[in-house]
Amino acid sequence: RLSPEQADAIISATHRPNRALFDLSVAIEKLPMHFMRKNEINKNLSIFEDTLGGSERLLSSPVPLFYSRHTARFISIWLLFLPFALYGQFGDSWNHIMMIPASLLISVFLFGIEELATQLEEPFTILPMQGFCDKIGANCDEIVSWAGQDVYKIPDEVIEQMEMERPELEMKSNLALLGGEVEEDVVEEPKKKRKILKKLLRIGEGM
C-alpha cells in the first residue's frame, strides 16, 4: 500500500499516471534482488507505460461531435418518414392503428443503437474502473504474501558430487594452462556441470 506522502504526491501531480510510474521505478531500484531481474521488471513497466499511452489516446480522442450529430439527425429524419412507408403495410388494421406501435418500436431500437455507439466512444466513463483497481490491488497483495516461499535448495547429493569432482577438474584445467594435452571430454566436462547447475537453479525459480 502507498504511504500517505506518496498518495498525496500522486494526487497533487499534474499527470498522475506518470507520477505513479516514477514511484514504481524508484521502488524497483530499491528492491534487494539481482540486476537481471530488475531489468525484466523494468521491461514490463515499459510495456505498461506504452499501454497507458494508448489508453490515454483512446480517452482523449473521441469520435468527432459532428459524427454523432449527423447520425442522430439522419435517424430522426428517417423515422419521421417511416410512417408513410408503413401506411400501406398496415391497411388491414382499423384506421392503420398498428402503424403507431410499430413505428415506436423501431424508433426505440434505432435510437438505442445510436446511444450505445455514443457510450462506446468513451468506455472509461461506463466501466467499473474502481472495481478493476480493487481486484488488481488484491492480486498484488496476494503475490506479495508469497514472499519467502520461492527458496530452492540444491540437493545435498548434487553438492557433494560437485565438491568431489572439483579438485580433479581444477587439476586438469591447470594442466591445460601449462600447455599439457587435455582430452576434449575433459574440457567439455565443466561446461556440462555448469549447464546442470543452471537447470537446477531455473527449476528452483519456477517452483
Image (tube, helix red, strand yellow):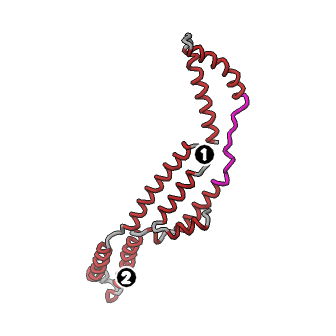
Task: Measuring from the top left, give residue 153's x and y in whole percent.
Answer: 70, 37
Disc on res. 18: none
Residue found at x 68% / y 25%: 162
Q: Is residue 158 above or below residue 90?
A: above
Main SS category, magenta section:
loop
Query: Is 152 part of what is drawn in magenta?
Result: yes
> Where, quadrant-wise, is the N terminus in this rendering?
bottom right
Q: Amino acid at mark 2?
A: Leu
202 sits left or right of 114 in the view: right
106 sits left or right of 32 in the view: left
Name the residue that disc number 1 marks.
33
Query: Is 102 part of what is drawn in magenta?
Result: no
Q: Amino acid at mark 1?
A: Met
Name the residue that disc number 2 marks.
104
Name the residue nearer the viewer: 13 or 77: 13
Task: Measuring from the top left, give residue 62's x and y in whole percent.
Answer: 36, 69
Q: Which residues are magenta?
A: 143-157
Residue 64, picture quadrant: bottom left
Q: Secondary structure at mark 2?
A: helix
